[in-house]
Image (cartoon, rainbow, N blue to C red):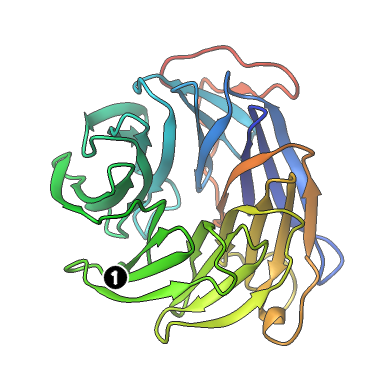
């Protein structure tokens, strides 16, 4: 398992999650260096590849097994606000990378090699977040224009657009793709994917803003934000399933659900959730323990920077690194490379 975090200080952080003395784990550093010219605003990881987007309008690419830098993409002319890989269920490597930016644009890239396939503008203002359907055929975006858009990723165009009356900051599909979640301030709307119908709203008990969310198995949705908690919602009943109180000392900026790996510890695979805070700390939890009592983190790393985003790759098998990649420098700025 790998975790990738971006920071306000322009640093990209890569960690490998490895077994220690059961049930403990350890976050082993893969790399850390100033990847962008301005703060990193979004990260994504899938299989052996990771990507970061920044306020410098660029996307940078990394090979995780070899800790290698693959290059950068310069197809956007505004800050990157969201990144998402798409990988078919039978593949452990991504097929596409989809990115969104603060000028309302969305770009679709082929992931091998990384080349731009299509760029269009589904929103009049900045795109706040992007969610790709498990089928890879469509995506949802929410923007500063207070609108929800559905994107046809096969044709590369907007197929649906509606005004919400309030600005949503996050949008996520559940693992089945039958529902999606839309975050507005301290509320999470649960919607039917087929017709966007609102089923009900989940409201933060402390009325604090939700800043990150990640879907889990069995209809669970994990959220975190200004309340400093990790909250697991049962989206079937609309109630809180369990919560890790004071998971961090400051607000949460990223949550990743890691579930598919058989080499972490002996016996049953733990149900792992990783979280990152603006205080620079990344923690990994076995959330099954949260049902009974407040758990202690299984692993922890302190980057000593203001983290802005977190992503992870759960897949165990990696392809060999792509040819032409260069080793990531530990403390130096990498050269600008067009494409990969």
Question: In this figure, which residue is indicated by the disc labeled 1?
Answer: 191
Report the residue at 29% width, 27% height from top: 116
Question: On screen, 57 above or below 155?
Answer: above
Question: On screen, 21 above or below 158?
Answer: below
Q: In the picture, residue 30 is in which quadrant? A: top right
Q: Residues within 10 Å of mark 1 (few under 14, many from 20)?
A: some
Which sits in the foreground, 187 or 2?
187
Q: In the picture, residue 75 is in which quadrant? A: top left
Q: How many marks?
A: 1
Report the residue at 32% width, 54% height from top: 166
The image quadrant where one finds the N terminus is bottom right
Q: Relative to 12, is 140 on the left or the right?
A: left
Regarding residue 259, the answer to whether it shows in the image is yes
Regarding residue 97, the answer to whether it shows in the image is no
Q: In the picture, residue 122 is in which quadrant? A: top left
Give the percent coordinates (x, y) of residue 87: 37, 51
Question: On screen, 187 above or below 56?
Answer: below
Give the percent coordinates (x, y) of residue 95: 34, 43
The image quadrant where one finds the C terminus is top left
Q: Relative to 101, is 197 on the left or the right?
A: left
Report the residue at 79% width, 49% height from top: 301
* Secondary structure category for the residue under label 1: strand
Residue furthest to the right in view is: 21
Report the residue at 41% width, 45% height from top: 84
Which sits in the foreground, 198 or 262?
198
Give the percent coordinates (x, y) of residue 22: 83, 71
Question: On screen, 134 above or below 75?
Answer: below
Give the percent coordinates (x, y) of residue 37: 58, 18
């Amino acid at each position: 398992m790998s975790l990738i975090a971006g920071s306000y200080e322009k640093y990209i952080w890569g960690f490998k999650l490895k077994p220690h003395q059961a049930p403990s784990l350890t976050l082993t550093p893969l790399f850390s260096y100033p990847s962008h010219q301005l703060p990193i605003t979004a990260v994504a990881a899938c299989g052996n590849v990771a990507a970061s987007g920044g306020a410098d309008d660029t996307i940078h690419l990394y090979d995780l097994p070899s800790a290698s830098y693959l290059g950068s993409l310069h197809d956007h002319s505004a800050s990157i606000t969201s990144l998402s890989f798409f990988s078919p269920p039978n593949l452990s490597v991504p097929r596409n990378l989809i990115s969104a930016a603060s000028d309302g644009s969305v770009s679709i890239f082929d992931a091998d090699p990384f080349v731009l396939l299509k760029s269009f503008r589904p929103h009049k203002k900045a795109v706040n977040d992007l969610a790709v359907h498990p089928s890879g055929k469509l995506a949802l975006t929410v923007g500063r224009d207070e609108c929800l858009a559905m994107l046809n990723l096969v044709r590369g165009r907007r197929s649906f657009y509606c005004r919400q009356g309030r600005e949503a900051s996050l949008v996520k599909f559940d693992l089945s793709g039958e529902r999606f979640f839309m975050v507005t301030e301290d509320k999470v709307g649960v919607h039917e994917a087929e017709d966007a119908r609102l089923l009900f709203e989940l409201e933060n008990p402390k009325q604090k803003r939700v800043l990150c969310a990640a879907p889990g198995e069995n209809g669970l949705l994990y959220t975190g934000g200004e309340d400093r908690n990790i909250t697991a919602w049962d989206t079937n009943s609309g109630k809180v399933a369990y919560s890790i109180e004071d998971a961090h000392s400051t607000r949460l900026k990223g949550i990743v659900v890691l579930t598919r790996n058989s080499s972490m510890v002996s016996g049953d695979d733990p149900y792992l959730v990783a979280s990152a805070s603006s205080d620079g700390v990344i923690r990994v939890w076995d959330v099954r323990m949260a049902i009974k009592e407040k758990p202690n983190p299984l692993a922890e790393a302190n980057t000593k920077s203001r983290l802005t985003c977190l992503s992870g790759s759960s897949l165990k098998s990696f392809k060999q690194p792509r040819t032409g990649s260069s080793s990531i420098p530990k403390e130096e700025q990498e050269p600008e490379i067009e494409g990969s």
